[in-house]
Image: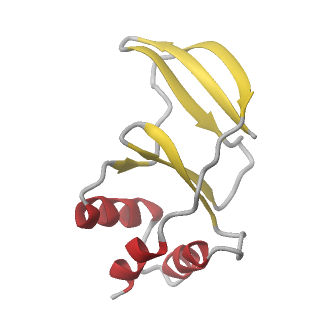
Amino acid sequence: MYRQLSFYTLNGIVKFIDLGDSVYGEWIIYDDMAPKYHVNLFDKNFNSNVIVNSLLENKKETIDSVIKKISTQQGVKLSMGVRPGIEILQKSEMIDLELAPLPESWLKNIIK
């Protein structure tokens, strides 16, 4: 379950998945403005999370640089999802999403 916040903005209603203020080492990755992936550095069950953790730990990459490289190499529109600067909260609700880890094949191209 994830908390989805809906905001009124100058560009209309924007939906944002909020992991909370105290979350460390986790990110929601959006594909073409829709939440699609969940990176969790502490979830060792997925090799892609281990690869991302290794890239960040060795200071070879930042999460932003990983997302930009994947977007360029794979021709996708990945982003971290940014909360609107000017916002009025419309509603907050818990929703059930099936967010996968990043595809391992995408990360292997960055390791090289």
Where, by quadrant of the figure, is residue 50 drawn? bottom right
Image location of residue 44, percent across then percent down:
70, 76
Where, by quadrant of the figure, is residue 54 drawn? bottom right
| Extreme residue in the bottom direction | 112
Measured along the vertical axis of the image, is residue 2 above or below residue 68?
above
The number of numbered discs placed on residues in the rendered structure image is: 0
Q: Is residue 46 left or right of residue 59?
A: right
Q: Residue at x 71, y 69 (%)?
A: 43
Image location of residue 110, percent across then percent down:
35, 78
Along the viewing direction, whichever of 3 and 89 lies nearer the viewer: 3
Where, by quadrant of the figure, is residue 12 drawn? top left
Q: Is residue 12 left or right of residue 74?
A: right
Q: Residue at x 65, y 41 (%)?
A: 97
Image location of residue 36, percent across then percent down:
51, 48
Along the viewing direction, whichever of 16 and 35 lies nearer the viewer: 35
Quarter of the figure with the C terminus: bottom left
Measured along the vertical axis of the image, is residue 105 above or below residue 112?
above
Q: Residue at x 24, y 62 (%)?
A: 72
Image location of residue 17, percent across then percent down:
60, 36
Measured along the vertical axis of the image, is residue 105 above or below residue 71?
below
